[in-house]
Amino acid sequence: MRYRYVTADVFTSRAYGGNPLAVVLDAQGLSAAQMQRIAREFNYSETSFVLPARDPAHTACVRIFTPDREVPFAGHPNVGTAIVLAREWRAAGGTVPESLVFEEEAGLVRIALKAGAQEAQEAELIAPRPLERAGVAPTTAVARALTLDPADIDTSAHPPQVVSVGLTFLVVQLASRDALRRAAPDAQGYAALLPLDGAKSIYAYTTDTEAEPETDIQARMFTGRMTEDPATGSATAAVTALRAALRGGGLLRLRVGQGVDMGRASLLSAHAEPRADGVWAGVAGQAVVVMEGTLPAPAEA
C-alpha cells in the first residue's frame, strides 16, 4: 500500500525557507515503527502522521516523529499540518473550518486558520499545556555545550532553565547577537549536560536585535543529534511563556526570528498570558506547500 504525503515549509511565506515538514495523510495502518522509519527517511526536524480522531468532535489525531523518536507535541508540525489539511479540503471542494482540534500525546492542540500571503496560509496554535518549569543548569556547563564562553550566557532575566508547554527544552538567554551567531553544539558538552529533566535540546536566544528590528528575539535550537532546527514553535511558545511569567502579568507578544544563521530564515509570532490556571502560550506563522507524492509502507524491521 502507498501513502500520500505533502511537504510544506513552515514559518515562512516562501518555498525553500523556514522549517521543512512532511505530512503523511491518511496514515492509519502504519505502526509506530513504520512511522519512525518514514520520519528517518525524510530526515526533517519532524514528520507528522494524520489519523482519524478518537473523538468525532475533534479534527484528527496527529502523531509527530523526529528522525529518532516520537514527540508528544511540536509547533511547526501543527502549523504545517493544519495548512496542508486546509489545502486538501479546499482541493476536494469541501468546507475549510476556521478552527481545528488535533489530538496529540501532550493533549489537545487548538488551531485557528487565517488567510496568508500569496500561496501561503497562516495558522495559530495554542499549546496543550501551561508553562512548566523544571531544573536549572550551570552556566559553565551550558557554555561548554554551546562552544561559548560563560560570559556569553545572560542570566539577568533567568538562569538556563528547563521549560515546557508540551515539549521540554533547556532555554538559554545569550548576551549578544554575536554570541548567538557563534554558538555551535559540542557533543561532549551535550553528553555531560543532557538529558536534564527531560530536555534533550538547547534553545538559545537573545534580545539583542538592534540590527534586526523586525524581531524582538533571535533564536537558534540545537538538538541532541548535533543538528540545528530552523524554526521551533514549541520552544518559542515556552520561552514566551517564561518571559511572560517573569514579567508578572499581562499579555506578552513577541516576534521571533530563527534559522537566519543557517540560511533558512523563519518568522514566528508568539504570545503568552498568565491566567489563574497557569501561563498559556501560543505561536502563529505561515506555511507554503512545496512537494507532494506517495511512499510505500516500509517493512516493520
Image (tube, rainbow, N blue to C red):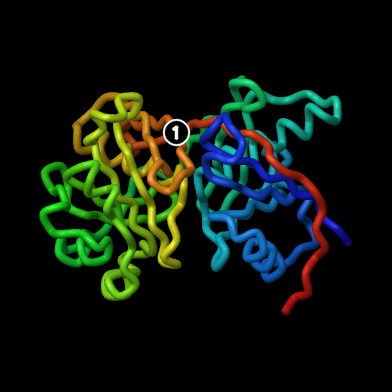
User: x, y percentage for residue 301?
Assistant: 72, 79
**Quadrant (top left, top right, bottom left, bottom right) of the N terminus:** bottom right
**The furthest residue to the right:** 1
User: x, y percentage for residue 151?
Assistant: 11, 54
Residue under the point 63% across and 34% down: 288
Q: Is residue 54 above or below residue 223?
A: above
Report how many numbered discs are placed on residues in the image: 1
In which image quadrant can residue 281 be found? top left
Q: Which residue is mark 1?
A: 267
In which image quadrant can residue 79 be found? top right
Task: Depth check: give the residue in front, 296 or 118.
Answer: 118
User: x, y percentage for residue 155?
Assistant: 13, 49
Q: Amino acid at mark 1?
A: Leu
Task: Depth check: give the residue in front, 39 or 196.
Answer: 39
Residue under the point 15% across and 59% down: 149
Q: Is residue 203 above or below residue 33?
A: above
Residue under the point 37% across and 34% down: 256
**The furthest residue to the bottom:** 301
In which image quadrant can residue 144 be found? bottom left
Q: Is residue 172 above or below residue 201?
A: above
Q: Secondary structure at mark 1?
A: strand
Residue under the point 55% across and 60% down: 66
User: x, y percentage for residue 2?
Assistant: 86, 58
Image check: 22 left or right of 244? right
Image check: 18 left or right of 181? right
Count neighbours of disc 1 (C-alpha within 10 A) and say few if under 14, some if 14 to 19, many if 20 or more. Answer: many
